[in-house]
Amino acid sequence: MFWRYVFAFALLISGGFSYGSVNSTEINGAIQRGRSFLTNLVEAELNLLPEFPGSKVYWLFHDNYLAAKVLSSSHPEIAEKISAAIHREGVTNSGKIELLFGEAESPLPFRHYQLKEVRRIGDKIIRTEVVTDRKMIGWEAYADLLLLASISEKNPVAAHGHWKAALQLWDGNGFLDPATRQHQIYSTYKLALAVLAARHLSPPESVPENLLERLLTMQANSGGWITDYALSGKKVGQANVETTSLAILALEASLVSKSAKAKPGKK
């Protein structure tokens, strides 16, 4: 899952995203089910979402921060309550995940993170993640960090360079970086980051043909997105807030790109 567990050339189609057999109706349906998964998890007492259904752990960053962003347009009142709950705990930022929205003050160079316990309420634990001052060495080997760097980098040439380096790790099923080799599982959130990065770049890049389809197949019956999948394609883990939020953001970005591509004069 995103930062907590961070330790082939692709065929590209020019001029926009590749969608294969995926259509806008299917994407919109997946987004709606994902939003329902998130809203159903909001706990009224805390106005926060647990890490996954049944969990007693509530991550302010990145989970609840991302959930608030995702729900801000469809469920603004819920999103506002989540944001207020985060600030109630005295936490204002993580220094990393905010880069997806241009809100991280110094996203680069990447630095190591620290997991912090904010407080306990009975058997419930509120936690968060913050970056430290210690610079991260060797991050260029990891697909997720390369994709995030392509979003954060202000220099277009460097940004596209990070993107191309990430695509070198695509093996047709997922991003085969050192973390994947070590654990023998692909991470779903990296698929979402690839869509977000491709959409963010100027000019936009194309994602591998079957990447969006793979992302959609990782949605569970609950509406949430499963965290990982085996090299065989079998789903591993369970649906959680962070992965679901990133998947929804990616699907929304894909719809924006699809709409732009369909307009006359757009590429």
Image (spheres, rainbow, N blue to C red):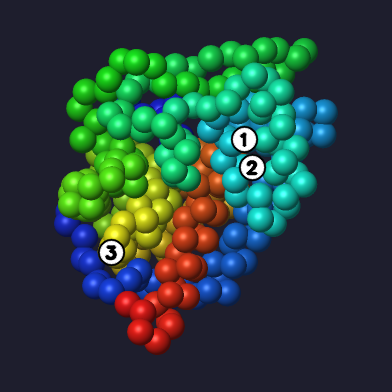
Q: What element carries label 2?
A: helix
Could you tell me which residue is drawn at 34 percent across and 15 percent down?
133
Q: Quadrant of the C terminus?
A: bottom left
The answer to whether residue 255 is above or below residue 72 is below
x%, y% of residue 55? 66, 28
Q: Quadrant of residue 148?
A: top left
> Viewer-proximal residue, 243 or 16?
16
**Identity, as a three-letter code, of the amino acid under mark 3:** Pro
Earlier along the polypeptide chain: callout 3 or callout 1?
1
CA–CA distance in space, label 1 to label 2: 6 Å
Q: Are marks 3 and 2 in contact (CB under 8 Å)?
A: no
95 lies left or right of 182: right
**Residue 64's mark?**
1
CA–CA distance in space, label 3 to label 1: 31 Å
Between label 3 and label 2, give the one nearer the viewer.
3
**Identity, as a three-letter code, of the amino acid under mark 1:** Asn
| Residue corresponding to mark 3 | 203
Q: Is residue 55 visible?
A: no
**Identity, as a three-letter code, of the amino acid under mark 2:** Ala
x%, y% of residue 3? 42, 30
**Residue 68's mark?**
2
Could you tell me which residue is drawn at 60 percent across and 45 percent down?
69
Q: What element carries label 3?
A: loop
